[in-house]
Image (cartoon, coloured by chain):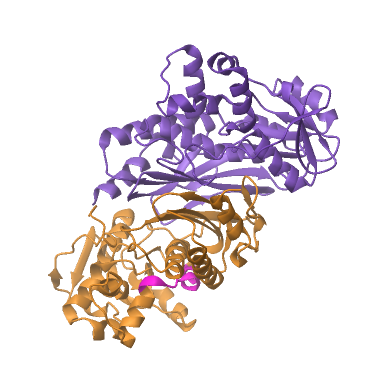
Chain colours: A orange, B purple
Amino acid sequence: MGEFELIGHYFASAACAQAGDGVALGIGDDCALLDVPAGEQLAVSTDTLVAGVHFPHNPDPCLLAQRALAVSVSDLAAMGATPLGFTLALTLEAANADWLRAFAQGLDQMARACSVSLIGGDTTRGPLSLTLTVFGRTPRGLALTRSGAQVGDLLCVGGCLGDAAGALPLVLGQRSDDSAAAKALLQQYWSPQPQLSLGQALRGNASAALDISDGLLADCGHIAAASRVCLQIELAKVPLSTSLQVFVDAETARNCALSGGDDYVLAFTLPEARLAPLQEQGLSIHVIGKVLAGQGVKLVDAQGQEIIQAKGGYQHFGSSGG
Amino acid sequence: MGEFELIGHYFASAACAQAGDGVALGIGDDCALLDVPAGEQLAVSTDTLVAGVHFPHNPDPCLLAQRALAVSVSDLAAMGATPLGFTLALTLEAANADWLRAFAQGLDQMARACSVSLIGGDTTRGPLSLTLTVFGRTPRGLALTRSGAQVGDLLCVGGCLGDAAGALPLVLGQRSDDSAAAKALLQQYWSPQPQLSLGQALRGNASAALDISDGLLADCGHIAAASRVCLQIELAKVPLSTSLQVFVDAETARNCALSGGDDYVLAFTLPEARLAPLQEQGLSIHVIGKVLAGQGVKLVDAQGQEIIQAKGGYQHFGSSGG
């Protein structure tokens, strides 16, 4: 048995590979088998992270695994789906036992936090990259898409924005800081928490939703295009964490929140009547604007005056594709 | 919009991305949505192919796409599943329009041949590699696994073995030959045909099944281990194509068929009484041995004498994982 086949066996015995609800057959055969209850649909999303493009070379393997799984599960949150399982395709330069142990530990922690099981995968030799495919289930016809925003709806986000982008100088080693604020930002970068409960609560309530990966402005642009409406954002209402405001100046904080990306916080539109019942459930919902007739994204001040041109969002760490 | 985002849009408009049966929502949102009929299960498999490991550097993009999709869909055939859709995570050094056009064309041809739709994916910059995740459906409880082989069952394969391994010197540029035999072997290497009809016909009939990727001996070893039995193979019954026998000497042909791998032909075990009805359907079934009590794989001559030690199968093109 080759070392890379051994790695497969290693993951197969990981805690997060123990079949959970809905996993009829896990790792070890030609395919895994999932049960999708009658009346539900299966939600599927695939994301690839490449060393030097989506994360620095030589990352902490535990943090890398947490981030990779969280980024993928966040797409399930954006659809209002309940996680079922995921496959991991891991390409590695070499098999290193310490590295793999730490990676599996990070994977396991995030899998437990998201109630999702590893159901299959492939381990190959090559330049470090990961492709995760995640599976969830939603009641048929109730998945949240990008295309249903209606004129008059509120525009909301599920939490503070810009922390991950604020952490980039730390991630890249351009700045060193062990303050509580720096640690909090790094935590948001490496270990974002997919907003699964919020997404599930938005089913049947939100008219459109997605998770913010490209940056608030760019992702609101995606909802606006898919729904053929204009999204107006009131700048002062965009929530910023105390950590971000302590760590960077006000203009940088604003840029991080508008265009930084990698937030993995939900953005969604909501008929106004649905807001109070959701807030009464204790959900984190920040109203930041509204849906207008028209197209694109409009950034305004408290008086409704347009204050800057909406630009395209940041395109992930280190990407030159942008 | 960056060039890699443009590539995503390019694939989204490809013919094979048009939603088919069972695809409720295709490319373009945070997740795709699949409908799994009541009483059925979803089969899922993930495979990664890395340049220089699983295929040569600078491959023909059309052939690469065909092979990548066929290799993945073959796992669905091995479970007896009916294909629904697939996701493609494509990592590329650079975006080249001609390359992408040829790749999409190959993908489209194989997707049509397998009746499977592209439902999502991710395109990133980095060293060339592909991860495909394929989805199929099977009636609940009828998927073919590796673990059900029973003592007394026949051991069968769905076609000739060794052609892809025989083609390797051509693929690697170590040998040049434009004979009909060479072309036939290359065709098997680059464009294997997943045995979907055979797999579906084996549901409720075969006791165990898989697709041969590591080589006949190694993969029979996987069934033997999962089913806790011994698989006995009669060497003279292993089917070889005329092309392979013309292209290489008899011993090389035998080694290619036993240990070469990359066949993507089904191997399965079958109660003897099930054989004739399946053959009457015109299915390609070659009986090559039988299931005995014991463990491992035993290679015998026509008199039942063990003739060579069963060795571990070949581990894919160029792999040093050993």
Q: How many marks?
A: 0
The one of B35 and B186 positioned closer to us in this rendering:
B186
What is the chief secondary structure element of the magenta stretch? helix
Q: Where is residue B160 shown, x and y percent of the image? A: 63, 23
The one of A65 and B29 positioned closer to us in this rendering:
A65
Let me know if residue A102 is in the magenta part: no
What residue is rendered at 29% in x and 70% in y? A290
Q: Where is residue A143 shown, x and y percent of the image? A: 49, 59
Q: Where is residue B82 shown, x and y percent of the image? A: 61, 38
The one of B35 and A141 positioned closer to us in this rendering:
B35
The answer to whether residue A309 is left or right of residue B285 is: left
Say if A247 sits above or below B204 in the image.
below
What residue is rendered at 78% in x and 44% in y? B148
Q: For residue A112, which quarter of the picture? A: bottom right
Q: For residue B130, which quarter of the picture? A: top left
The one of A37 and A45 positioned closer to us in this rendering:
A45
What residue is rendered at 66% in x and 49% in y? B38
Q: Where is residue A73 shown, x and y percent of the image? A: 47, 63
Say if A183 sits above or below B11 in the image.
below
The answer to whether residue A114 is left or right of residue A29 is: left
What residue is rendered at 70% in x and 20% in y? B282
- Magenta range is A189-202
